[in-house]
Image (cartoon, rainbow, N blue to C red):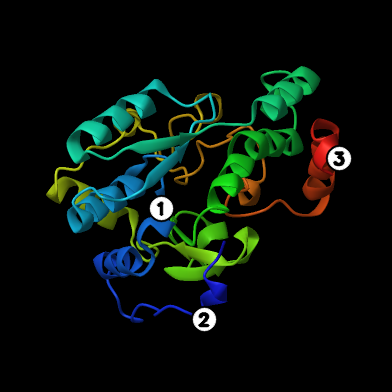
Amino acid sequence: MGPANGAKFRWPARDASAEDILRWAVDEFGDRLAISTSFQATGMAILDMAACITGGDVRVFSLDTGRIHQETYDLIEQVRKRYGIEVEMLTPDGYELSRMLTLHGPNLFYDSVAKRRLCCEIRKVRPLKRKLATLDAWITGLRQSQSQAREGVSPVELDEEHGGILKIAPLASWTEQDVWDYIRRNDVPYHKLYDQRYTSIGCAPCTRETKPGEKARAGRWWWEEDDADKECGIHVSPSGQIRRSFDILLEEVLPRVR
């Protein structure tokens, strides 16, 4: 799919607020739009805004990698009951997952950055690609202050990685404090691991609480030395030697599609 590379729709005003951007996206793309969320704080703020704008008539999907926290499932149930929203759960392809685990074991992500990236590719990136192929636009919880790799995030941009559809980050310019102020002001449900000093929440084996003085994403893949590569591949692709090693591993797992 894809909205003709941005040629046939109205762009939101440059000074549009987060609510304005969400309202514009809903009006412009309708059921060809969906919110992608892992139910972290930013995603919950976006869900609450979208529910207020649409009355709950909005498409939402999440990646169920098979390794997420029980607290994440608990929050999904809260979202379903409070907002009346059906959350579509995307899962890995059974063949791809089975072959990866057979070749490299269930805890391959501890062996190397390339193997961890492979795990993210099979469990997250490829299911997402399949979903985005059916949409014209998707909404994410990316913010510029989340990490160095995300400093250049724009509220609305063409997603060339996914066929030129629109990638919308309505809270791109918000700080972490802005997000939590919104959550508290509107009594938005939030992930209970935040109460245990987690500041970024992913899969259970790959996430720990953050220690005082650490960066927000320090608890993600904490055994890896290079902070710049602490991404799963959904928003930032691997590069250099990691890219080359990753490609070799992917070739082993998916010989049929290469």
Residue under the point 26% across and 34% down: 80
Instruction: Report whether 27 appears left or right of 54.
Output: right
Instruction: Decide which of tag 3 and tag 2 comes sooner along the chain.
Output: 2
* Tags 1 and 3 touching, CB below 8 Å: no
SS at mark 1 in the image: strand
Q: Helix or strand or loop: what does disc 2 sit on?
A: loop
> Upstream in the sequence, badge 1 or badge 2?
2
From the viewer's perspective, is the residue at label 3 or at label 2 nearer?
A: 2
With 55 as the anchor, is 246 left or right in this view?
right
As rendered, which of 56 and 147 lies closer to the eye?
56
In the image, 210 versus 245, the foreground residue is 245
Residue at (84% x, 44% y) in the render: 258
* Drawn side of residue 98 relative to residue 11, left or right: right
Alpha carbon separation for disc pair 1 and 3 = 33 Å
Q: Which residue is mark 3?
A: 248
Q: Nearer the viewer, residue 126 or 45?
A: 126
Q: Residue at x 23, y 47 (%)?
A: 56
Task: Classify 240 as above or below 2.
Answer: above
**Residue under label 2:** 7
Q: CA distance from mark 3 to mark 2?
A: 38 Å
Q: Amino acid at mark 3?
A: Ile
Q: Image quadrant of residue 115?
A: top right
Tag 1 residue: 34
Q: Residue at x 53, y 24 (%)?
A: 66
Whole-percent x, y for residue 133 in the image = 58, 53
- Crowding at dot 3, Cα within 10 Å, few <14 / some 14-19 / many 20+, comes out as few
Residue 139 horizontal side relative to residue 124, left or right = left
Instruction: Mark 1: give few (<14), some (14-19) or many (20+) Cα within 10 Å.
Output: many
